Structures are given as C-alpha cells and as structure tokens.
Amino acid sequence: MTSQYDYYQARADAQREIADQLSGAARTQHLTLAAMYDALATRPKPKEAEPPEAQREEGPATPESEGDYLRRRAREERARAADTDDPLVRRIRFEMADEYLRRAEAHA
C-alpha cells in the first residue's frame, strides 16, 4: 500500500501531464488541481527531529480558531510558493494564500 504522500504526489503529477497537453483555462484548471494535490502531499515531521524541550512543553492544546487556521494555511501556502520553481504553480499558490487571508478577514 502506498503512503498518502505518494498518492497525492502521483495525482499532482498526473494533473501536470494533462495540463501539458492543454492550453487556456483548461490548462490553468489542471495546474490548480496539481497545486492542490501538492499541498495535500505533505509529509509529517518525525517526532525525533523535535528537541526534547518542545516535546515536554506540550500541554493541553487549545483549539485553533477558524481565523487562526486560515491565517496559518495562508502562511504555509506562501512558504510552498516560495519553494517552487514553476512560476505558474507559484502564482496559483499565492492566489490560494490570498484567498485564505480573505476568508480569515471575513471570519474575523
């Protein structure tokens, strides 16, 4: 069985292959889907990589508000956009981050 990361990465690659054969709005739509699958294809960090102090200081987690969640997602999307070499994927990720921020402001 493949991991969730491999599954979403394969889906993103398939969407990029389809986009390579298209143009216009259809191409943009498939590249957007590829970016979304890339966003889902994140690997969890191993607990061993965290310093022992960080593991000990974990107390009861306070629930994250929806506005905080949306702002965090925007920061994550901007970081992923900065890491990509493809200008179209970068633009899509920045647009996704902007949308998260718009929703966070509307929710506040």
Image (spheres, rainbow, N blue to C red):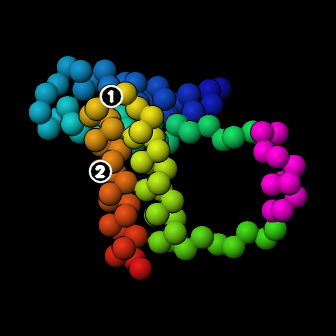
The magenta stretch spans which residues?
A: 47-58
Which quarter shows the N terminus? top right
Q: Which residue is mark 2?
A: 95
Using the image as rendered, state which of residue 4 and residue 98 is in the foreground. 98
Instruction: Please state if 98 lies on the left or on the right of 40 as rendered.
Output: left
- Residue visible at 17% across and 25% down in the picture: 22
Which quarter shows the C terminus? bottom left
Report x, y in % for residue 19: 24, 26
The answer to whether the residue labelled 1 contacts the one labelled 2, judged by CB atoms less than 8 Å apart, is: no
Q: Looking at the image, is 75 positioned above or below residue 3?
A: below
Question: Residue 86's mark?
Answer: 1
**Mark before the other along the chain sequence, 1 or 2:** 1
- Residue visible at 48% across and 29% down in the picture: 9
Report x, y in % for residue 39: 46, 42
Amino acid identity at mark 1? Asp
Report x, y in % for residue 47: 79, 43
Q: Looking at the image, is 11 positioned above or below residue 92?
A: above
Amino acid identity at mark 2? Glu
* Residue 67 magenta: no
Image quarter of residue 84: top left
Image quarter of residue 104: bottom left
Image quarter of residue 15: top left
Question: Residue 42's mark?
Answer: none
Residue 37 seen in render: no
Element at label 2? helix
Instruction: Please state if 46 lies on the left or on the right of 93 as rendered.
Output: right
Q: Looking at the image, is 90 positioned above or below residue 78?
A: above
Element at label 1? loop
For disc 2, the neighbor class at 10 Å (few under 14, some 14 to 19, many from 20) is some
- Residue visible at 63% across and 31% down in the picture: 3
Report x, y in % for residue 35: 37, 38
Residue 55 seen in render: yes
